[in-house]
Image (cartoon, rainbow, N blue to C red):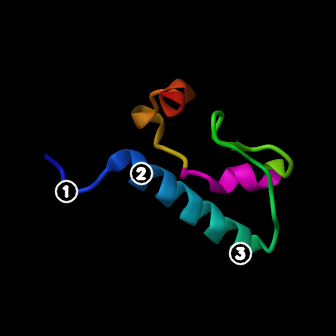
Amino acid sequence: MPGSQFDYAAELTEMVLLGVLAQRYSESFQWDAEAMRITDKPHLNAHLREPAREEWRMGDDLWRG
């Protein structure tokens, strides 16, 4: 059994990383957790994940569970 609760840790990590993004660009934004997108400032969406090499791409549908 793992020593941490992943359902809690994943949401906590998401919140912290979004806070870093908000501080880095000195902007507040609206986060759509279901779609994993910033809704009101789309230019910040480019910073949410790194581009994958073409041969490693599996599709965006994997990000939505």
**Mark in front: 3 vs 2:** 2
Disc 1 packing (10 Å; few <14; some 14–19; many ≥20): few
Residue placed most toward the observer, 53 or 9: 9
Q: Residue at x 65, y 57 (%)?
A: 47
Q: Is residue 44 rendered to the left or right of residue 49?
A: right
**Furthest residue in direction right, as rendered:** 40
Q: Amino acid at mark 1?
A: Gly
Q: Amino acid at mark 2?
A: Tyr
Q: Amino acid at mark 3?
A: Gln
Dominant secondary structure of the residues highlighted in magenta in the image:
helix
Q: Secondary structure at mark 3?
A: helix
Q: Which residue is mark 3?
A: 23
Instruction: In the rendered structure, find residue 3 and report the number of the disc placed on it.
Output: 1
Task: From this view, report whether residue 62 is shown above or below residue 36.
Answer: above
Q: Is residue 56 rendered to the left or right of residue 11?
A: left
**Mark in front: 3 vs 1:** 1
Disc 3 packing (10 Å; few <14; some 14–19; many ≥20): few
| C-alpha span from label 2 to label 1 | 12 Å
Q: Residue at x 55, y 65 (%)?
A: 16
Q: Secondary structure at mark 1?
A: loop
Q: Which residue is mark 2?
A: 8
Q: Secondary structure at mark 2?
A: helix
Question: Which is more N-terminal, label 1 or label 2?
Answer: 1
Q: Residue at x 54, y 52 (%)?
A: 50
Taking the magenta stretch, the answer to whether it contains residue 45 is: yes
What range is drawn magenta here?
A: 43-50
Task: From this view, report whether residue 33 is shown above or below residue 16.
Answer: above
